[in-house]
């Protein structure tokens, strides 16, 4: 498989993994210190508020009138990734699939940890109703189930712990960077399509980023700075 096709395969998996993820920024000392130089977080209202990672708009406030069906049925979307991985395992060279699967496992571990932490600490930081609480619990269950299924079929790793605490800066530098590329790629495709059809409006495709990929290996964690939040979360730094 070519480098481009390998990247497209990986980004497609990440799209299904990250999109419609619900989260909040707790006003904990750790995050307050990490985000103190970011203008977006100068507004305290952005803390302890529930956001959802929308496919087209990026992170937006989770409002009462939002259709949460994609979050509710996230398990089916994650199962699509499992079928795609099974398919690619047969099609790819062993070293190619191993690299994709290792990187994908890192993503699942990170999201499982975050989803678990958010669910456990939700009521400590956010005032919400039973519906929102239920969404967080369902999200936690879906990611944990996806992690368990992936390990069963693709990984020999046995030391995965849900209480493992990924270092904050690495999360911002690595995992949000991959997410940026997924969002950018999709919006570039839609932008080109809209231009060809003459239907692009000035208010569409608000996330604008630059995607940089290392030469080797084909898919790699970019050396992004914490300013990745500027492109992913549309904040001023």
Image (cartoon, rainbow, N blue to C red):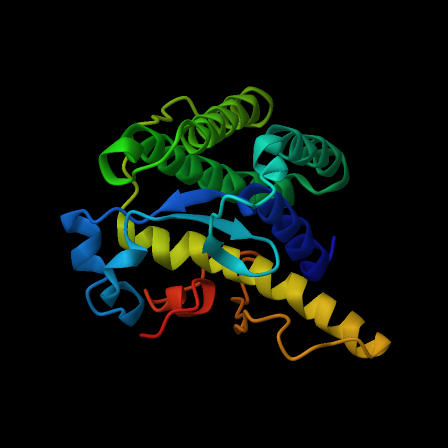
Q: Is residue 220 visible?
A: no
**Residue 126 picture location, percent across and down:** 29, 40
Residue at the location (28% across, 57% down)? Answer: 45
Q: How many marks?
A: 0
Residue 165 in the image: above or below residue 180 = above
Q: Of 32 and 108, which appears nearest the observer?
A: 32
> Among all residues in the image, which is located at the extreme right?
197
**Residue 208 picture location, percent across and down:** 54, 73
Asked which quadrant contains residue 43, the reply is bottom left
Residue at the location (55% across, 19% down)? Answer: 152
Residue 208 in the image: above or below residue 71 = below
Asked which quadrant contains residue 106, the reply is top left
**Residue 218 picture location, percent across and down:** 59, 58
Q: Is residue 30 left or right of residue 192?
A: left
Asked which quadrant contains residue 194, the reply is bottom right
Q: Is residue 172 visible?
A: yes
Q: Is residue 158 left or right of residue 183?
A: left
Q: Is residue 53 left or right of residue 15?
A: left
Q: Quadrant of the C terminus?
A: bottom left
**Residue 134 picture location, percent across and down:** 45, 26
Residue at the location (56% across, 27% down)? Answer: 150
């Amino acid at each position: 498989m070519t480098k481009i096709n390998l990247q497209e395969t990986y980004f497609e998996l990440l799209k299904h993994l990250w999109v419609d993820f619900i989260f909040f920024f707790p006003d904990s000392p750790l995050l307050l210190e990490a985000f103190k130089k970011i203008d977006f977080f100068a507004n305290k209202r952005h803390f302890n508020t529930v956001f959802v990672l929308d496919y087209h708009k990026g992170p937006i406030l989770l409002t009462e009138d939002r259709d949460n069906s994609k979050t509710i049925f996230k398990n089916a979307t994650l199962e699509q990734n499992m079928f795609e991985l099974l398919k690619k395992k047969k099609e790819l060279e062993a070293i190619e699939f191993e690299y994709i699967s290792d990187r994908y496992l890192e993503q699942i571990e990170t999201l499982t940890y975050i989803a678990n932490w958010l669910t456990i600490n939700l009521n400590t930081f956010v005032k919400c109703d039973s519906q929102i609480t239920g969404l967080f619990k369902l999200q936690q269950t879906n990611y944990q189930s996806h992690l368990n299924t992936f390990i069963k079929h693709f990984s020999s790793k046995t030391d995965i712990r849900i209480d493992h605490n990924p270092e904050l800066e690495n999360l911002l530098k690595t995992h949000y960077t991959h997410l940026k590329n997924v969002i950018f790629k999709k919006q570039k495709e839609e932008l080109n399509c809209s231009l060809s059809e003459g239907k692009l409006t000035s208010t569409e495709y608000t996330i604008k980023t630059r995607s940089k990929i290392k030469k080797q290996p084909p898919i790699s964690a970019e050396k992004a700075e914490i300013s990745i939040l500027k492109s992913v979360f549309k904040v001023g730094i």
